Amino acid sequence: MNSLLAIAIAIQVLSALLIIGLVLLQHGKGADMGAAFGSGASGSLFGASGSSNFLSKLTGIAAAVFFISTLALSFFGSRPAVSSGGVMEQAPVNSPQSQSESVTAPTSLPAKPVGQAGEIPK
């Protein structure tokens, strides 16, 4: 169970970093106007308009992976923890009464005579 939790955390961190990188790589709406007048990225890796479509689709996929990993982490977090104690924690415990029955001890002590109220014993 701990390995699934570690994998879900790793996937969430990697998808969050991927989303940050993809959002920083995308052009804003104002950058399209400059591309229309010749200073655009027609000779870029993805073509004139291919980068925005590719990056936006990749950002959507990374966001979906991020949300799925968040749901997985909330599922693992809501389950009760399994005790990972040793063998001695799972051993049966003897009650103190059963141990005292094995030792023979007097059940009552002889009573001492007590003086009257206000009297100091000698």
Image (cartoon, rainbow, N blue to C red):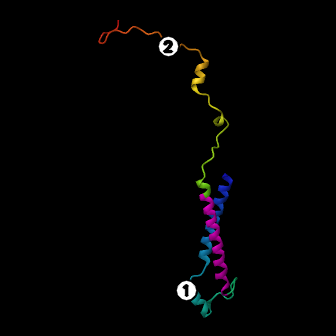
Q: Outermost residue toward the bottom?
A: 37
The image quarter in which residue 10 lies: bottom right
Compared with 61, 78 (above or below) is above
Answer yes or no: do the residues labelled 1 and 2 have beta carbons within 8 Å? no
> Which quadrant, please, contains the C terminus?
top left
Gap between marks 1 and 2, in whole Å?
Answer: 96 Å
SS for callout 2? loop
Q: Nearest the camera: 41 or 119?
A: 119
Q: Amino acid at mark 1?
A: Gly
Compared with 90, 33 (above or below) is below
Q: Nearest the camera: 122 or 36?
A: 122
- Dot 1 or dot 2: first in sequence order is 1
Compared with 8, 110 (above or below) is above
Circle on res. 108: 2
Residue under pointer 1: 30
Query: Which residue is depicted at the point 60% across and 17% down?
Result: 103
Badge 1 density bin: few <14, some 14–19, many ≥20, Cα 10 Å: few
Magenta segment: does it hold 14?
no
Query: Which residue is depicted at the point 66% across and 75% down?
Result: 58
Rendering coords of residue 67 (x, y %):
61, 66
Rendering coords of residue 42 (x, y %):
67, 88
Compared with 110, 34 (above or below) is below
SS for callout 1? loop
**Range shown magenta:** 48-74
